Amino acid sequence: MKNNLFDRFKPKETKFFPLLSEMTEVISAASDLIVECVQTAADHNSAVEYYKKIKEQERRGDQIQNQIFEELNNTFITPFDREDINNLSSKMDDVTDLINSCAKRIMLYSPKTMPESAVRLALLVKESAACLNLAIKELDVLKKSPAKIKEYCAQLDVIETKADDVYEHFLIDLFENETNAIEVIKLKDILHELERATDAAETVGKIIKTIIVKYT
């Protein structure tokens, strides 16, 4: 029950907050790399190197998520419902997975050129990562001050809408002007992963908003 009198006196493990913050650092590092990756995508050797670096972050994220899962199984009292923490970390990991998926496609497909829309989407992914970082840092003081975290979640919604617009306009331009069918397939697939990354970040925001409703 929310605000149960006895819950106020139960000691709650705070180890989850640093782990979740560490996950946002992984997302931020991966987002920085994907911005650079799309800007140098025409150079296959650079694309390979960026993919390797992003893959390292993806593996690091997996390790943190596994650690969170283990801690959930071994911790008696958690700061939020176990399902909420597990769902939150899982969806955060999805953001890194999608960034990694984009980098992998760039490496495999070797597109001739990358449209400006790719850079714009990558920058929106980076902006989402910054919002997630700020939002997660507010979780441990959620009951005292939920206003900031609500604002960050709202920003994630705005960013996702911008990403949808960029992707839609990219598709219109792609189908109107690109005559090479193979390049159409390559670019559509690459940019779709970036757009999906902003979707995943927005989903994290929705999970956080659910936690706000439950615990404030």
Image: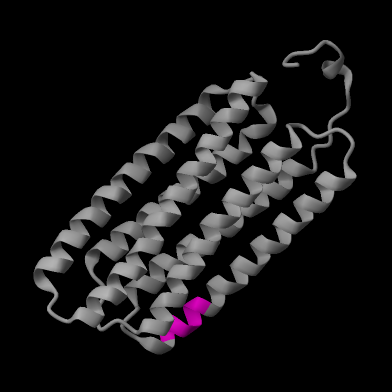
Q: Please determine whether, in this image, residue 171 is positioned above or below residue 209.
A: below
Kindly tell me whether residue 119 is visible in this rendering. yes
Q: Residue at x 51, y 35 (%)?
A: 206
Q: Position of residue 73 (x, y in %)?
A: 85, 46
Kindly tell me whether residue 24 is visible in this rendering. no
Tell me if 130 is positioned left or right of 143 in this view.
left
Q: Image quadrant for the C terminus?
A: top right
Residue bounds of the magenta highlight: 46-51
Q: Position of residue 66 (x, y in %)?
A: 75, 58
Q: Quadrant of residue 10?
A: top right
Q: Main secondary structure of the magenta part?
A: helix
Q: Quadrant of residue 179?
A: bottom left
Q: Nearer the viewer, residue 136 or 176?
A: 176
Tell me if 80 is positioned left or right of 102 in this view.
right
Q: Please determine whether, in this image, residue 158 is positioned above or below residue 31.
A: above
Q: Position of residue 109 (x, y in %)?
A: 36, 82
Q: Quadrant of residue 135?
A: top right
